[in-house]
Image (spheres, helix red, strand yellow):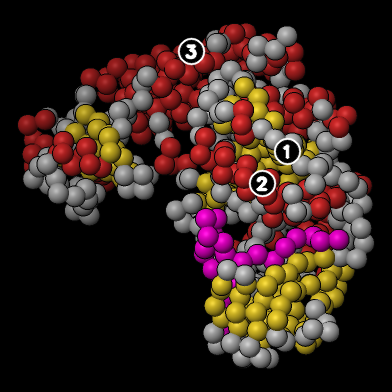
Amino acid sequence: MKLFDILLPREGICSETSLFYKTISGEAVQEDDGLCFEEGAAVSFESFFNCFSANKYHKYTDTRHIDIELDFTGSFEIVVEAVTYGRRKVIASDTLSEGKTSISVDIEECFTPGYISFCLTALKKGKLLGGRYTRKEPPAKNIRIGIVICTFRREGYVKANLKRICEYADKEPILKDLHVFVIDNGNTLDSSIENERVTLIYNPNIGGSGGFSRGMLEVYERRGEGFTHMHLMDDDVVFFPETLAKTAAFLSVVKPENNDACMGAGMMRIDKPYHQHEFGAYWSGLRTYSYNGRYDLRRINSLLDNERIYDPEYSGWWYMTMPVHFVEKFGLSLPFFIKYDDVEYCIRACKNIVLLNGVGVWHEAFDIKSTSDLEYYHRRNELILASIYSPKQNAFSYFRKLIFETAKLLVCMKYNDLKLCYKGYGDFLKGADYFNSIDLEPLHKELRAHNDKLYTKKELLEMTGLEDIQFTDISKSPPYTLMKLTLNGYLIPRRLYRFCGYNKSGLRIADATKPKIRAFFCAEKVLIYNSITETGYFVTLNKKMLFKYGFKLAFTLIKLVFRYPAAAKTYRRNFNKLTSIENWKGKMKLS
């Protein structure tokens, strides 16, 4: 059986060559139908997509021997290596030609941690047309996946991904029974997208948590049709459809004790395809932490770190596969609308999350999407998460966090964010009954009304009279001690601000993806600009906010001390009700 395909760069998905192969010597050029080798050219396939995660296959599956099968013209020398930190050894080598197109490998010869990779040297001019890792034993079980895509007015992304999935599934045996459930929270997709593989379901706008819960429920209620797994996927990810086949094949060969295994995926940035944002993560009780974040996947040590067997508590629902019976055993997600629903459900249900090199998707960086309404969901939902899974965290832990958030948002003049931050704390303290009674869509509209107005680059240039948008040079900013003593300029009289300016126009320009507090020191007005999306918005100093939120901070401390324990208890006590199918059917307006 095929375990997974050897991949080459593909236009429209990823053209970052180093994620697939590296030319060691000579000349190798990719064409539409394969990789062309000049005589003597050597190419290594030691890469994110083409290395073999031997340790993980050994731990989770009964696979012990594999074959590397190649489709090619010409003849090649193949050398297979086991690789770990600072060490590598040849575990197989041979000459491949028309009479011999594969090589067998014993994966037990691999290092721990480590992977298996191979290198091809052309003995004469030739072309690699394709290849795959296989094993002689058949699958241990049949896998049928129900893909759940939750979307809200992103028709272009959805249609492109459906086309990619369906075209590939039609020719891939292990995905022959795959079905896609598109949950349309915006009710804007046309039923013409439906076919024998695709079901479109209109849903109220109850957020990502509601959309994914609806999809999970649909797959669960059709479990009699043979669905074994549900696969949750964002509508705007970019991915190789072969990744789905690799996921299904892996799950089909897991050992019986790993039947509840879930498969996540690494998340890479669309603007930097080699930049890994996350490879699984965990919850500390106060915040989430990523494994292997900010990794350059062109580096061998990054691949080796990915081969370490961590124990992640969750993996994002940009790509997550779980057994269907989890719905019966654990219920559905909490009605968070967005943010932390995937974290909470994985902590609750997914005790065995597997991540492999080669299973990854590309997604916009999250700092590109920062808006005021997200501040509310972050603060409220992390408090609920802590009350359930970190009951030993007390009110003072989150008060300290609120101090930091208040200071950060005041410094950056994000007063809308600050207002919604405190609303998140306040709504949490109202308890589980209030939380469950919220009409999700009207609340979301109310929150979004606080988002700052975004302007395009063209509009910003017209408004400011600038020829181009350049971030303010803060290399000559005042000492950090002065910034602290004056609360980043809040305590300095405005008439003295002209002596603290960084440019003649008086307008500061800060990077939206990584704003530095120095850019806001003694500033009257700041343009917060995102050079990736080429959009920005303005914030203006309001010194009254320092005193307003100083008092609000003190008042919130009193409320946290006296009301946090009781509020936290309500979420634990009502947890089963909040996550029940019956509760969600009410929010979905299902009879």
In which quadrant is the C terminus drawn? Answer: top right
Alpha-carbon neighbours of circle 1 within 10 Å: few (<14), some, or many (≥20)? some
Disc 1 to disc 2: CB gap under 8 Å: yes
Q: Amino acid at mark 2?
A: Ile
Q: Image point 33% across, 16% down: which residue?
A: 551
Front of the two marks 1 and 3: 1
Amino acid under disc 1: Arg
Q: Above or below — where is 585 with respect to 254?
A: above
According to the image, label 1 marks what residue? Answer: 197
Q: Report which residue position mark 3 lands on.
A: 442
Q: CA distance from mark 1 to mark 2?
A: 9 Å
Q: Residue at x 81, y 61 (%)?
A: 2
Q: What residue is rendered at 88% in x and 29% in y?
A: 224
* Image coordinates for residue 256, horizontal then vertical, percent: 92, 47
Residue 36 in sight from this viewpoint: yes
Whether residue 24 appears in magenta in the rendering, the answer is yes
| Disc 3 element | helix
Q: Earlier in the sequence, mark 1 or mark 3?
A: 1
Does 335 sit left or right of 414 as displayed?
Answer: right
Magenta residues, as a range? 1-25
Discs 3/2, front = 2
Determine whether 349 is above or below 79 in the image.
Answer: above
